Image (tube, rainbow, N blue to C red):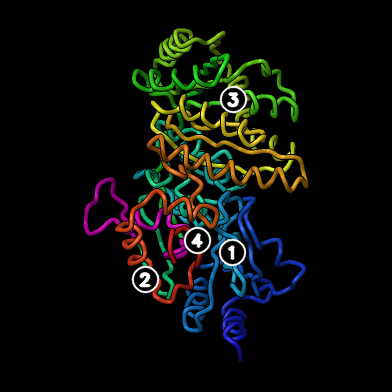
Amino acid sequence: MTPEDAVLAACETALSDRDVVTDPDRLPTYQRDRSTGSPAGEPFAVVFPRSTEQVSAVLSAAHEHRVPVVPRGAGSGLSGGSNAIDGSLIVCVEKMRDVLLVDDGNGFVETQPGIYNTELREYVAQSGLWYAPDPASKDFCSIGGNVNTNAGGLCCVKYGVTRDAVLGLEVVLADGRITRLGRKTIKGVAGYDLTGLMVGSEGTLGIVTMARLRLGPIPAPPTTVVGVFSDVAEAGRAVSTIMNRLRPSMLELMDNASISAVEAWQPMGLDTSAGALLIGQFDSPGSASDAKVLSEICEQSGAQETYVSEDPQEAEMLVGARRMVIPALESAGDWLLDDVAVPRTQLARTMVQIQEVAERHDVQIATFGHAGDGNLHPTIVTPRGDDEAAARALTAFDEILDVALANGGTVTGEHGIGSLKREALAKEIDEIQMDLHSRIKEALDPRNILNPGKALARW
């Protein structure tokens, strides 16, 4: 019996027949995430556990027989983090979708990892509570994936990223042992922060089977401000001034290519002559006065036009336009999405340099992102099936990472390293850090079965 057969037999014992899939016609559906430019191998099976105990049984068998395991949530990732490798077993938690507890007195929820972000937000809203992290993919990304990539979102400029919302986790380790990390209290400094270590580890240290997440009150309807700029540099320079004086609940940026892509895909009346849009929101008492200040800052920074709206429907339309950028670019051709973050004072310089990269390599780059925290998503779009353009796009992609590093930034703000950016990570962290990463990995996964070849600069 091969190791794969032995693991498959253990899976068939622990799980129902319908939750163990080896059909070669179905496997490709779970073979890769949404990223382009990252490799994907051939798995021998996909399993769909429904409980922590089933995950434990699967990992125990995989550990015993040294079979690689690729954890998977909704497959919405953009860095190849859940891409299969040859001979791997995919452990997909999409059927672990139960909300286990809403503790309104202490302000937290306990949930299985497969539930979508929006579904969880709607569930806790029934109790008058709010889950803050809101990735642009919130309608189709899972909480487990959010935890594993430390996902951000449009509201993180005020409310923080996923790590800021995680109070505790239930995790199945590589050898099948089950542990509960974290706490139920607001404060707690007992021991090392193993919960924080797991958040953003991209499935390389364990599989999350429960997340305890901080909740808050539902914010008031927002006041929205839009600044229309003639070029991205002006918009970028406005951001630092805004963030030094105000605390918006959202501050997003779209360049001309992003605006034009959305308008071509789904006309919304956006100004396609604008060089850039800044979209800001405030959701606290005093929003009207804050919105006025933001509008004034935009005008002082060179905005051609600003307008303020307290209409919830108009606000949803404007934010919806920002969320539509990725699907609009997907419809325009082959695409390669980057994810970098720089200090806010370097935004203008970085965006200008990204435009120079586009010109140098004769590719279209649409830049959008979370301006308030310096997180940009330059997305390279090329004609479908144009191999020469695709090669130029890969070169441009790497140069954008170099631009971010040169400007004091990072090669990933929220999408993760996955398999796409391992070489770039080696440029960002030094040998000591790489050694520490390797030692942590070896301590928690000595047989290297969990998502091998992902997240780390060196394996």
* Alpha carbons under labels 2 and 3: distance apart: 43 Å
Q: Earlier in the sequence, mark 2 or mark 4?
A: 2
> Which residue position holds label 4?
454
The residues colored magenta run 181-209
Q: Secondary structure at mark 4?
A: loop
Q: Nearer the viewer, residue 439 or 394?
A: 394
Of the image marks 1 and 4, the number of the one nearer the N terminus: 1
The picture places residue 392, in percent across and down from the top left corner, at 65, 43
In this figure, which residue is indicated by the disc labeled 2?
A: 442
Work out whether mark 2 precedes mark 1 in sequence or the reverse, and give the earlier one: 1
Q: Amino acid at mark 4?
A: Lys
- As drawn, which residue projects farthest toward the left? 190
Asked if the magenta segment contains residue 212, the reply would be: no
The residue identified by callout 3 is 255
The amino acid beneath tag 3 is Asp
Do the CB atoms of the residues marked 2 and 3 lie less than 8 Å apart?
Answer: no
Measure the alpha-carbon separation of dots 2 and 4. Answer: 14 Å
What label does residue 92 carry, if any? 1
The amino acid pointed to by label 1 is Cys
> Can I make out residue 126 in this image?
no
The relative height of residue 71 versus residue 344 in the rendered view (above or below) is: below
Q: Earlier in the sequence, mark 2 or mark 3?
A: 3
Q: What is the spatial separation of the Cα atoms under label 2 and label 1, in whole angstroms?
A: 24 Å
Q: In front: 22, or 450?
A: 450
Residue type for callout 2: Glu
